[in-house]
Amino acid sequence: MFYKKKGFPEVGELVMCTVKKVLFHSVFVYLDEYASAEGMLHISEVAPGRIRNIRDYVKEDKKIICKILKIDKEKRHIDLSLRRVNLSQKRNKNDEYKQEQKAEKLLEGVGGKLKLSIAEMYHKAGYAMIEEFERLGECFYAIVADEVDLVKELKIDPKIAGEIVKVVKEKIKPVRCTASGIISVSCSASDGVERVKKVLKGMSEFKGYDAKITYTGAPRYSISVIADDYKTVDVRIAEITGFGEEMAKKLGCEISFKKDK
């Protein structure tokens, strides 16, 4: 991708990496989304358990998704982990990265129509969109939903803004993402069934989120939440289950939640 973030990522952030070099006890990678940033994984952070051959897990030029563990800004040293990224996180990050690649390609296509290079498109529009929305893709979805005015709010040239809006609405359709899991909730009180129903009803109606709870066999219930992007859907399911835990505690119920990977 042409666009690179400046500075350093945050500890705990998930980053797309390209393997640069594989040694016996360590792996060196490029951080694809950051300008001139590299990092290192110790063999213990590549995979759980004993590793006989590190190349069974990573090879030069392979794309991997890692978690930032530690940053020494003075030495420009970044410690990473591959084993601490679960399947759901990998899927979400990979989808996010691919969406941003497509968004940049779309911006480049608009530039082609206006006889502007991708660098010029970023200076005239892209950087303003990223500053406001963090990613091009998020801005494009806001355009599709008519939630942003590029000219008035982002001060983008009307001719360029008009072409971006036209192309975005032609090429991008609203995306709906789902997060799901299993809730186990029970209550030993004489009116336990009614208390459990109150907990589940409260969760399903929480803040008007698009949540669906269905019975799978006492005391288990499946829950699914829908939103326009993975970040939002993860936040929503966390808020709903957190609310459910508080409500269950007040009503004397036992509750647990396991998110699907």
Image (cartoon, rainbow, N blue to C red):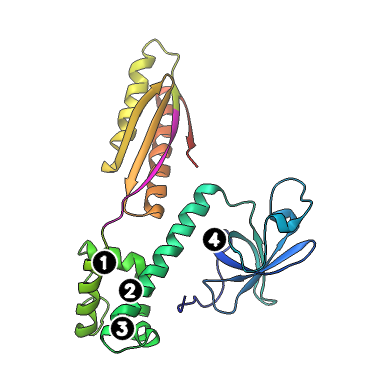
Q: Secondary structure at mark 2?
A: helix
The residue where tag 3 is placed is 111
Q: Is residue 45 left or right of residue 126?
A: right
Which callout, 2 or 1, points at the residue further toward the start of the chain? 2
The answer to whether the residue labelled 2 contacts the one labelled 1, judged by CB atoms less than 8 Å apart, is yes
Q: Is residue 182 above or below residue 163?
A: above
- Mark 1, Cα crowd under 10 Å, few <14 / some 14-19 / many 20+, is few
User: Horizontally, is 165 left or right of 83 in the view?
Assistant: left
Question: What span is in magenta?
Answer: 174-183
Q: Is residue 79 magenta?
A: no
Which residue carries the number 4 mark? 13
C-alpha span from label 1 to label 4 = 30 Å
The residue at which mark 2 appears reads as 106
13 with respect to 70 (left or right): left
Amino acid identity at mark 3: Gly
The residue at the point 51 percent across, 52 percent down is: 89
Residue 134 visible in the picture = no
Tell me the CA gap for discs 2 and 1: 8 Å
Residue 192 image-quadrant placement? top left
Q: CA distance from mark 1 to mark 3?
A: 15 Å
What's the amino acid at mark 2?
A: Leu
Residue that carries the numbered disc 1 in the rendered image: 171
Q: CA distance from mark 4 to mark 3?
A: 31 Å
